[in-house]
Amino acid sequence: MLDINTEEELVQLVGGKFKLTSLIQKRIVELNRGAPPLVEFEDNDEPTLKQTVIKEILEGKIELGEREELDQALQEAVIADKPEDAEGSEGEGDEDGEGTEVYGSDIKKIKEQRIKELAALLNQKK
């Protein structure tokens, strides 16, 4: 557990308890996936992921991105990874960029399609 002063400082730095929780969770996932820590500890003991993230926040090394920036980056990633046979079959409001929403299941479907395409390409008999 954090002491009350550290917790309040973190909440104020990030802008709220929900944002703090979200930032901690997202950064722990990044660290679990192999991202390097942005801070160093003087002790010889291995710090926990939570301790690493808290120190990163306190030192101003990480912050939560703005929602609009994240949405745009996600949209661009999905458009770049969209299977060719799915283009143009979205539905109404697509032509001017309005009405398109990206959900986690859409990204999962795109990834699954790309994996199938790669598997087919790698398993082709010569």
Image (cartoon, rainbow, N blue to C red):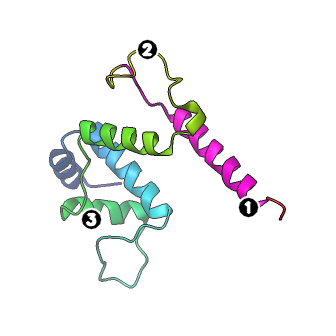
Question: For mark 1, what is the residue?
Answer: 122
Check residue 116 for magenta coloring. Answer: yes
Residue at x 39%, y 50% (from the top left corner)? 26
Which secondary structure dominates the residues rendered in magenta?
Answer: helix
Residue at x 35%, y 64% (from the top left corner)? 51
Single out the mark in the foreground, 3 or 1.
1
The correct choice, above or below, for 14 with respect to 67 in the image is below
38 or 91: nearer the viewer: 91
Q: Are marks 1 and 2 in contact (CB under 8 Å)?
A: no
> Furthest residue to the top?
92
Question: For mark 2, what is the residue?
Answer: 92
Question: Which badge, 1 or 2, comes first in the chain's sequence?
Answer: 2
Element on which disc 3 rests: helix
Q: As shown in the figure, which amino acid type bears the numbered disc 2?
A: Glu
Element on which disc 2 rests: loop
Residue 18 point in image, percent of width and height: 30, 37
Residue 1 point in image, percent of width and height: 36, 54
Per the rendering, the mark at residue 55 is 3
